[in-house]
Image: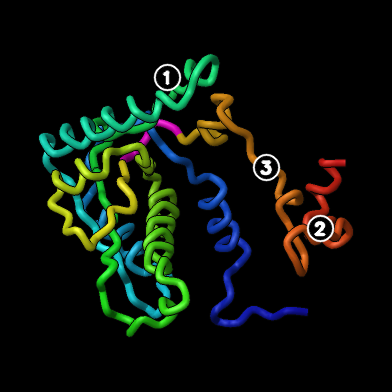
Amino acid sequence: MRTRGRNSFSPTERQAVYRAIYERRDIRSHFQPTPVPPEVLGRILDAAHHGPSVGFMQPWDFIVIRSAAVREAVHECFVAANRQAAAAYSGERLALYGGLKLEGIREAPVNLCVTCDRLRNKGAGLGRQTDPATDLYSTACAVENLWLAARAESLGVGWVSILDFEMLRRLLEIPPHVIPVAYLCVGYVSEFPGEPVLETAGWERREKLTQLLHFDRFGGKDSGQAASMFPQRAREEE
C-alpha cells in the first residue's frame, strides 16, 4: 500500500493537473477584451521559465507584444503566409481550410513570442553534443508549461504557426542566432471547446493511443499489456 509523502499530490490536486492537460485547447476565437492582469501574466511566464531544459540551459526569451501597430503588422505576416499555405490544398480540403479560424492576433489582449537563443552557453553544452536540437525541444517544453498554467488561470492560448517568419524576425528585431519558436495569443475566452477545434471542424481526428504504443522496438505489439494499461479504452475499442 502506497503512503503519501510530502512530495505526493492529493487526489484532488492530481485531478486538477490532468484536467488542465485534457481541457487545454488551441484557442483562435472567443477572446474577450478583458485585460490580463500583470500578475497573472507574470505567473504563466514564470511557469514557462520553470520548464524542463536540457543541461539546465534555459534557452528561451519572451517578447511581450503590447503595441497595436506591431500586432497589426504581425497579422500581415500571417495573411502572407496563410495565402501561401492555402495553395497546398484543393477541392473540399481547400474549402474546409478557408473556413478555419487559425489565429487571434488582433483579438487576444496579449501576444507573446517565445524564442530560442541557439548560442546561449548556459549548461556548458550538456546534452547538446549528441543532439544540438535539444535547445529547441526545451523551448517547446516552456511553451507547454505556459499553456497548462494559462488553462489553470482560465486563459486561452492559441499558437500561431502560420507566419512569414522572416517578416516576423525583421518586425520584432530578432537576432539571426535566435529562433522564433512560438507566437502565442493569450486572453480570457467566452468558452473552452469540449474537443479540439480542428477535430470538431472535421480537419483531423485523434489517433487511438493503443495504435501508437510499441514495446521493446518500433512495431513491437503487446495487446495484453496495452489492455492492462488502458482497461476502459480497450473495452471501448473492442
Which residue lies at the image location 24% right of the left edge and 60% below the top edge? 178
Instruction: Report helix, strand or loop for mark 2.
Output: helix
Instruction: Report helix, strand or loop for mark 3.
Output: loop
Dot placed on the residue nearer the N-terminal end, 2 or 1: 1
Q: CA distance from mark 3 to mark 2?
A: 15 Å
Which residue lies at the image location 81% right of the left edge and 58% below the top edge? 226
Q: Give the answer, above or below, for where 133 lies relative to 55.
A: above
The amino acid marked with disc number 3 is: Glu
Query: Residue 174 location in percent, x, y?
Result: 17, 55
Q: Which range is magenta?
A: 186-191
Quadrant of residue 134 within the rendered picture: bottom left
Classify mark 2: residues with Cα within 10 Å, few (<14), some (14-19) or many (20+).
some
Q: Nearer the viewer, mark 2 or mark 1?
A: 1
On screen, residue 225 versus residue 145, left or right, reads right
Which residue lies at the image location 14% right of the left edge and 44% below the top edge? 171
Which residue, given by chain and number where applicable, does mark 3 sit on? Answer: 207
Colouring method of the image: rainbow
Q: Which quadrant does the C terminus fall into?
A: top right
Q: Is residue 198 magenta?
A: no
On screen, residue 92 versus residue 190, left or right, reads right
Q: Nearer the viewer, residue 123 or 225?
A: 123
On screen, residue 62 versus residue 55, left or right, reads left
Dot placed on the residue nearer the N-terminal end, 3 or 2: 3
Q: Give the answer, above or below, for where 29 lies relative to 142.
A: above
Mark drawn on residue 226: 2
